[in-house]
Image (cartoon, rainbow, N blue to C red):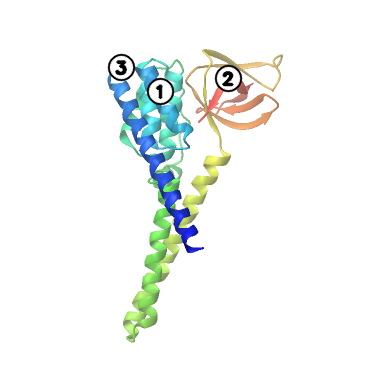
Amino acid sequence: MKKHVILFFLLFGFIGLNANTTNQSLLTKANQQYDAGRYNEAIKTYYQILENKVESAQLYYNIGNAYFKLKDLSSAILYYEKAKKLSPNDKDILYNLGIANSRIVDKIEVVPQIIFKRWWNSFYNIFSTNNWAKVAIVLFFITLAFSAIFLLSQQRFIKKLFFLFGLIFLLLSISSFFVSYQKYYYTKNHKEAILFEPTITVKSSPNKNSVDLFVIHEGTKVYILDKIGDWIEIKIANGSIGWLKENLVKYI
């Protein structure tokens, strides 16, 4: 039985190591193709990595850069946005996303947020979902360490001090976990998409004969509010809401 268990873990480790080696080789190949100006080939190779169930902000960023070089702004913005979801404060991602957005037709004025919401969003986007979860775990272990000192110490002052520290770090750990869960929930349930049609007329209802509300263009980011059949209700950055066909967008 022990031999079988050992063989299982050795085989599992070998498969994982082989997969990592393959993905690293593909990444090196794709980067070389990109550096040589063979952007279409680089994109195909990057996609091979995605097909291996691997994703990272850097990988999406590289794909976005390749599409940008091909002047495919909609695809570039799509992958920059995917990268931004995983690494919301990465300066390179934000800079290139800003450049790509400056070159699309629509220049939509964003509805200003109240100051408290801006502060919360700045705090909320310090880390990605996974990193917030890691922070929560680290803070929880610190809490356990303080709890151990509290239980083992014989001095009244030390017990009070580390009880207070333990309580503070426990609250911080719970708060970090809450932020991590909220980001995960938002990612799964609040869908965003990029338009992939040169010109789109947004309708007042999910019907092609309904009233025309406004026109938007490829590369614009929309927020998905609802879906009926093959129609989706969308909202753009200035708060305008309407309906369009789902096949005109690609989800971030």
- Taking 5 as reference, is 145 above or below it? below
Residue drawn at x 32%, y 21% as measured from the top left? 33
- Taking 196 as reference, is 52 above or below it? below
Mark seen at residue 248: 2
Q: Do the residues under discs 3 and 2 have CB atoms within 8 angstroms?
A: no
Q: Secondary structure at mark 1?
A: helix
For the residue pair 204 and 170, the one nearer the viewer reads as: 170
What percent of the width, then of the height, locates residue 112?
45, 34
Question: Is 242 on the left or on the right of 97, as rendered?
Answer: right
Q: Quadrant of residue 212?
A: top right
Residue drawn at x 30%, y 17% as measured from the top left? 37
Q: Do the residues under discs 1 and 3 have CB atoms within 8 angstroms?
A: no
Q: Earlier in the sequence, mark 2 or mark 1?
A: 1
Q: Quadrant of residue 103?
A: top left
**Does residue 119 show up?**
no
Marks 2 and 1, Cα distance to the nearest angstrom?
22 Å
For the residue pair 59 and 48, the one nearer the viewer reads as: 48
Question: What crowding class fits label 2: few (fewer than 14 Cα within 10 Å), some (14-19), or many (20 or more)?
Answer: some
User: Residue beneath label 1, please?
Assistant: 43
User: Residue beneath label 3, please?
Assistant: 37
Amino acid on which disc 1 is placed: Ile
Residue drawn at x 34%, y 32% as measured from the top left? 25
Q: Earlier in the sequence, mark 1 or mark 3?
A: 3
Q: Secondary structure at mark 2?
A: helix
